[in-house]
Image (spheres, rainbow, N blue to C red):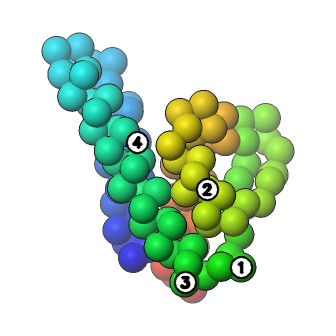
Amino acid sequence: MYSDILTICWSIKEVNRNLSDRQATSDYSIKYLKKGCSDLALMMRELGRALPDEKIEVIDRNGQKKSFSINEVSDMLYDTKKILELNLIDNISRWAEARKLA
């Protein structure tokens, strides 16, 4: 499951990075980003049921650390403002990489 989460995070980051280069396909890219975040949210929700006490430490753009349950993070993945404000994709990716190695 952690490998799948890492793959989706990588894909979201790549599409987001290249979004400005692809004006002709930007509508498709935005739909892809929304679907990717939705798919990631579903995976996180499933993982949250298996690990109800698990917390993800999030470092926001201001460098402040906050901890959220996996279910809280999965809910935030539907809110573009929260994704950007809390740098969620990078934080989820970092968390999944650490869990995968554990």
C-alpha separation, residue under disc 3 versus residue under disc 4: 26 Å
The percent coordinates of residue 94 (x first, y second) are 57, 61
Checking the image for residue 50, the label placed there is 3
The residue under label 2 is which amino acid type?
Answer: Val
Q: Residue at x 52, y 47 (%)?
A: 77
Mark 4 in CB contact with mark 1 (< 8 angstroms): no
Quarter of the figure with residue 62: top right
Q: Name the residue that disc number 1 marks.
A: 53
The residue under label 4 is which amino acid type?
Answer: Lys
C-alpha separation, residue under disc 3 versus residue under disc 2: 15 Å
C-alpha separation, residue under disc 4 versus residue under disc 2: 17 Å
Checking the image for residue 73, the label placed there is 2
Label 1: state its secondary structure: loop
Checking the image for residue 18, the label placed there is none
Q: Residue at x 28, y 33 (%)?
A: 31
The residue under label 1 is which amino acid type?
Answer: Asp
Mark 3 in CB contact with mark 2 (< 8 angstroms): no
Q: Name the N-terminal-most of marks 3 and 4.
A: 4
Label 2: state its secondary structure: helix
The residue under label 3 is which amino acid type?
Answer: Ala
